[in-house]
Amino acid sequence: MGAMVERNGGEPIDVLVVGAGAAGAVVAARVSEDPNRRVVLLEAGPDHPLASALPADLVDGHDNSYTAHDWGLEYLPVSARADRTDRFPRGRVTGGSTAVNTTIALRGTPADYDGWAALGNPAWAWPNVLEAFKRLERDLDFGDAPYHGDAGPISIRRFSPAELVPTQAAFLEACAAAGHPACADVNAPDAVGAGVMAVNKLGRLRISTAIGYLAAARYRPNLEIRAGATVRRVLFEGRRAVGVELEPTAPNHPGAIPNGTAAAEDGGPTRIRADVVVLCAGAVHTPGVLVRSGIGSAAEMERLGVAAVHVNEGVGAGLQDHPALAVICLAKYPELCATDLPLVQTITRYTAAGSDRPLDVNIELITRARWGGNRHDQHPRAFLLAPSLEQVEGRGRIRQRSLDPAVGPAIEPDFGVHPLDVSRHVRAWRDALALARSEPLAGFVEEVVFPDPARAVTDEDLARLAATVSASGYHPSCTAHLGPPEDPSAVVDQHGRCYGVDGLVVADASIMPFVPRANTNLTSIMIGEMIGERLRREPERYRA
Ligand SMILES: Cc1cc2nc3c(=O)[nH]c(=O)nc-3n(C[C@H](O)[C@H](O)[C@H](O)COP(=O)(O)OP(=O)(O)OC[C@H]3O[C@@H](n4cnc5c(N)ncnc54)[C@H](O)[C@@H]3O)c2cc1C
């Protein structure tokens, strides 16, 4: 049994944040603005404090980083669960997935957050979250608009016409020809139609939360950032969270750093005491930390031999994502798909024909794509159109396979299953096929190779195919969602406070009640802003 240590010069820790990703880095930065609050930020992966020494994969926002700073997870896509897994990248480094992602910086629509509020969570109404969205950004194009910010930590810009890859420019023209209105600012509250993407990168430099928020905050004497620190579980005295227990870093774990967390001097695990613990490990890992701590479904905790602190069947349930399909094209010239080009530059946001859900589809053009050969290999001439379903009915789950944090959970999304999801997605797939075949985009396409025009003819063919090839948009969320006390599936209240215990907060993509109609990075940072600010301004709310 390791002794409970108190970090930060031996002084008591006010707020201990677990996971330095989109939300966690923000929570730590915002709370530590109060010099009288001692904050410790724990991150399982490495930390690269000096921008000048940042590894190339973290610098280059023109491509995702898939392996060098990744958890090495796989997921089981859709119904054909038994025999086909695919990688499920998650950043494992300070900055979390914001440090490895595509840098698409999209807000959800006002109706998304008003929808969260309407479920009994008034704190998340659009006017409130808008303030957080404004606070987080430095919008270099529309910073003077009343619904934008011009002084926040995350720089956001849009590609100029001259910067567009020819296929990306042609995609916008094809969208215009198909009747999609032109959209100058994809982050305006009433944005609809086709336009250049808003991105959080400057040149190629990805502005992760490690750069935007931690670069400045890390010099505060009241903030300690501790990398190579994997949290095994939250510790309780009765029903009160009093700190965390760390996992000794396994040397062969993906992304492990040489001088990882050592055991306490007496040989037991390292334990850190704090007033408030905030879980920001992301929608894939936060459920695992909760279950290992004794908060989760009764059956799962019994199977794993965990003593229950509080049974909550919502933990790990409710998984949502943005399922994506692909229209894969072989380009006429390999130069159009070159590896140094930006991966995504354009988007159209619209409503699928016949759908009663406004703006339920996004189509992005992805400059290069995997095709043929090894499933992780890019084809030198492949690019794709990705119609992604932004409002989904289906809900999957995260299931713990082991108590060992190094063993990834089973990630079981529910893509291509719910009839309403499938019918809308098939229509969007047809829309994307039509765009690939219309000028001027068609002029760059040698051949559409997927879906195979000979085998996928009817809507039924496409629906069957969607059930096996719908892929993750890498936007897992809702696995420990917020909600009012009368909602039995809610894991936390609208302020992120975990039901059934005191002193434990969750603030990351897992608390979304449903996934918003946008890639989830900006919404996750916004969640960090909302809860970080509240933790700093109203500490008594969290000390209960
Ligand atoms: C390859 C890729 C591309 C993407 N592209 C985009 C995009 O272009 N635009 C967009 O909007 N969204 C994108 N996303 C999604 C977006 O990055 C996420 O929605 C967002 O980062 C989620 O934020 P989070 O704080 O919940 O989790 P994360 O940002 O993933 O942060 C979780 C952090 O917790 C750490 N952690 C986990 N478990 C533990 C533990 N036990 N102890 C200590 N630390 C732990 C992790 O290492 C990580 O640093 C992408 C994601 C990936 C992986």
Image (cartoon, rainbow, N blue to C red):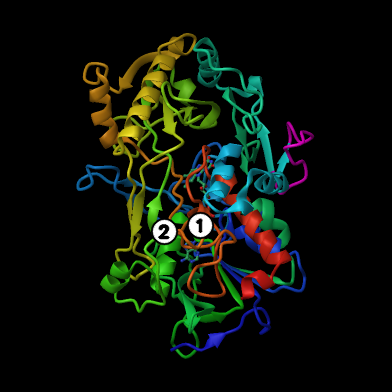
Question: Could you say where residue 225 lies in the image, as x and y percent from the top left?
Answer: 62, 67
The residue type indicated by label 1 comes to Gly
Tell me which segment is drawn in magenta: 140-154
- Residue 19's place in the image compared with 377, above or below, is below
The reply, left or right, for residue 509 in relation to residue 12 is left
Within 10 Å of disc 1 (Cα), the crowding (few <14, some 14-19, many 20+) is many
Instruction: From the viewer's side, name the closer residue of 99 and 285.
Output: 285
Q: Quadrant of the N terminus?
A: bottom left
Question: Which element is circle 2 on?
Answer: loop
Residue at mark 1: 483
- Residue 463's place in the image compared with 98, above or below, is above
Question: Could you say where residue 215 lies in the image, as x and y percent from the top left?
Answer: 69, 57
Determine if residue 105 is in view.
Answer: no
Task: Name the quadrant containing residue 78.
Answer: top left
Determine if residue 320 is in view.
Answer: yes
Residue at mark 2: 489
Question: Does the magenta-highlighted stretch encompass residue 385?
Answer: no
Instruction: From the viewer's side, name the closer residue of 379 and 354.
Output: 354
Q: Quadrant of the C terminus?
A: bottom right
- What is the distance, in whole Å, between disc 1 and disc 2 at their CAs? 8 Å
Q: Earlier in the sequence, mark 1 or mark 2?
A: 1
Question: Could you say where residue 409 lies in the image, as x and y percent from the top left?
Answer: 34, 59
Residues under numbered marks 1 and 2 in contact, where contact means CB atoms less than 8 Å apart? yes
The reply, left or right, for residue 490 in relation to residue 308 is right
The residue depicted at 44 percent of the width and 48 percent of the height is 476
